[in-house]
Amino acid sequence: MALTFASLYCGCGGFDLGFTEAGYRCTGAFDIDPLAIKVHRDNLKSPTTLCDLTSTNPSLGGLRADVLLAGSPCQGFSTVGKRDPHDPRNSLLVLGGRIAVATRPRVFIAENVSGVVAGEQRRFWDALANTLRTAGFRTTDFLCDAQRMGVPQRRRRMVMVAWRRNRDFRFDIPPVTGGGLKSALEFLDGVSNHEPSTLLPNSRSAMIANHIGQGQKLSNVRSGPRSIHTWNIPEVYGRTSRRERHVLETLIRLRRQNRLRSVGDADPVTARAMSLSLGHNVRDTLKSLVRKRYVRYRNGAFDLTHTFNGKYRRLASDAPSPTVDTRFGDPRYFLHPTQHRGLTVREAARIQGFPDSFVFDGPARTQYRLVGNAVPPPMARQIASCIRDAILETP
Ligand SMILES: C[S@@+](CC[C@H](N)C(=O)[O-])C[C@H]1O[C@@H](n2cnc3c(N)ncnc32)[C@H](O)[C@@H]1O
């Protein structure tokens, strides 16, 4: 008989597809989002329930499964967002553990962003482990690196496994390289969810994209070959003189040398440090740069304008993709390696390891959200096989 699994916070079913591909059968998948449930049902054809798990009885109507999955929301833990320790969604992580205690699967698996074990947020991860251990589960946790699990993407996720047998378990699988992006983005003609929308040639975004090569991004506060500065794109951000560019490059260097703060990107440079390095007449140049909005002045110090940091990041064909997130369709955040546009839903799904037969539905924004939130199916498949071999089917 096939092993079974159920899935809390199932989304469109990335985690669940991996388990299904590894030979498990789904006995129930739960989510609050009707579009996620629809896409899940259309593709995985397994029993789904549209519900708010915070107001559902934790026994889930007597749900039975060998494995219970919980890929709870990550917004309060992720370094991409506000990382708010008081985000009400953070407690959904611990709720997954309470549901495991009530439904008593043989194995419970939680997945979340790596930020869940950093700083103040770690208390939710620890509370989850405590809930499970108090109820007699053993637990372990580890970092999964998608790039080493056959996915062409830099994506690192924390995974907690809880089991009830008195035996040891270590997540130990041979690495499989995910390679570069090139093959993931080939042969897309006629494939569903692939509707490329190229930037209008004279638009501001196209003019910016023209300057950004593979592996580069728009950033004023970083130096080196991977950063293009706004003053390198005069047709959009305005012309600068050679002296102004020299002052801007010096500001980049000094803001890293004389750091006023130990973390973050805001490292203003005092007017005195600028004068010492560039002479007294630098003040006129700085005034002109403030007027042109390349530089801002606050409390006696100058800093580069931050608004553009990490925008218009162009993916490189021969390297893994940065983490696929919900903004992958927006060219202001991510550009296709060779075309002036964002990524299509299908391209994002390919980079996540979804097969082309998995079809997304609903408004474009929703589709990108479903893809970006998913556990890459190849990563899930390897976790599923490892759990089966090491815990469920070992005598
Ligand atoms: C990170 S996504 C899950 C992605 C999924 N594990 C996958 O691999 O495709 C988190 C999901 O939690 C769902 N969610 C948020 N609050 C919820 C609640 N109160 N009850 C049930 N589901 C909820 C969201 O709709 C979202 O689909």
Image: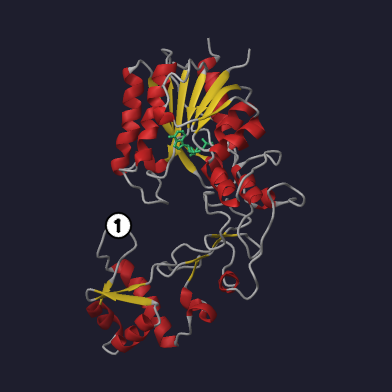
Q: Nearer the viewer, residue 56 or 345?
A: 56
Q: Who's the residue at 36% across and 72% down the image?
A: 304
Q: Nearer the viewer, residue 354 or 370?
A: 370
Which residue is the site of mark 1? 263
- Measured along the vertical axis of the image, is residue 213 above or below residue 394? below
Q: Who's the residue at 50% across and 77% down the image?
A: 232
Q: Is mark 1 within 8 Å of ligand 1?
A: no
- Measured along the vertical axis of the image, is residue 336 above or below residue 302? above
Counting from the top left corner in percent of width and height, residue 77 is at 38, 43
Badge 1: few (under 14), some or many (20 or more) residues near its Cα, within 10 Å? few
Counting from the top left corner in percent of width and height, residue 298 is at 26, 74
Q: Quadrant of residue 251?
A: bottom left
- Measured along the vertical axis of the image, is residue 268 above or below residue 115? below
Query: Residue type at mark 1?
Result: Val
* Image mark count: 1
| Residue at the limit of the structure toward the right, as seen here | 190
Q: Is residue 379 visible?
A: no
Instruction: Determine whether the residue tagged by mark 1 lies in a helix, strand or loop.
Output: loop
Q: Is residue 364 visible?
A: yes
Counting from the top left corner in percent of width and height, residue 247 is at 37, 81
Counting from the top left corner in percent of width and height, residue 14 is at 57, 36
Q: Who's the residue at 41% across and 45% down the image?
A: 75
- Quarter of the image with the N terminus in it: top right
Q: Quadrant of residue 380?
A: top right
| Residue at the limit of the structure toward the top, as seen here | 395
The colouring scheme, among rainbow, by chain, secondary structure or one colour, is secondary structure
